[in-house]
Amino acid sequence: MSRFLRYLSAVLVLLPVFLSITPLSAATAESAASEKEIDAKALYRHWCSQCHGLEGRGDGVNSTPDMSINPRDHTDASFMSTRSDEQFEDVIRGGGTRVAKSPLMPPWGATLTDEEIKALVGYLRELCNCEYEGIVSHKRLRRVDPGFK
């Protein structure tokens, strides 16, 4: 049997196998990802703890006393309760400059999925053991964050 005929017979034998395999579409991948539970603590430790610390106190290995803006202490309920989940999502997605804060806070929107960002916001609420209290006065914000303008 010629080499061509052997090749052709192998293709014909394997063709039904290849046709039965459907590529994983983006929608299928997304639904599979949403079905599995996102480990927000693991995400936080991987992406956030270098600056915010393992326990979220703003004392990570990349946080130094000479920084012009130190990483936020995510355990500070008095401050964290003044920000909505949407505001947290915005700063995680767009970085510090999006909310006129430190340019050292990178934008994670191209790295993390929307579901991962929402999971991180939920974990921030666990760290501070607080919920958003609604709009607060400028006087209270200045007490919580002296640099507030």
Image: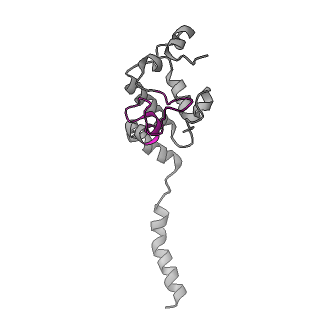
Quadrant assignment for the C terminus: top right
Query: 60 or 28: which is nearer to us?
Result: 60
Q: Residue furthest bottom?
A: 1
Q: Is residue 137 visible?
A: no
Does the magenta portion include 49?
yes
Q: Is residue 74 left or right of residue 89?
A: left
Q: Residue at x 59, y 28 (%)?
A: 101
From the viewer's side, name the closer residue of 50 and 106: 50
Name which residue lies at 54% across and 24% down. Answer: 87
Question: In which quarter of the view is residue 128 placed?
Answer: top left
Q: Nearer the viewer, residue 88 or 37?
A: 88
73 lies above or below 148: below
Q: How many marks?
A: 0
Residue depicted at x 51% and y 36%: 114
Residue 86: percent from left, percent from top: 53, 25
Position of residue 149 relative to residue 107, above or below, is above
For residue 64: magenta? yes
Residue under the image location 57 percent in, 36 percent down: 104
Image coordinates of residue 40 in percent, x first then y, are 40, 36
Q: Is residue 97 at all visible to an observer of this figure? A: yes
* The image quarter in which residue 17 lies: bottom left
Magenta range: 46-72
Of residues 112 and 44, the one nearer the viewer is 44
Instruction: Kindly give the residue lying farthest to the front in the view shown.
Output: 66
Q: Quadrant of residue 106?
A: top right
Q: Magenta span: helix, strand or loop, mainly?
A: loop
Residue 92 appears at what percent x and percent y?
Answer: 53, 33
Q: What color scheme is it?
A: one colour
**x and y percentages locating residue 111 in the rendered image:** 53, 43
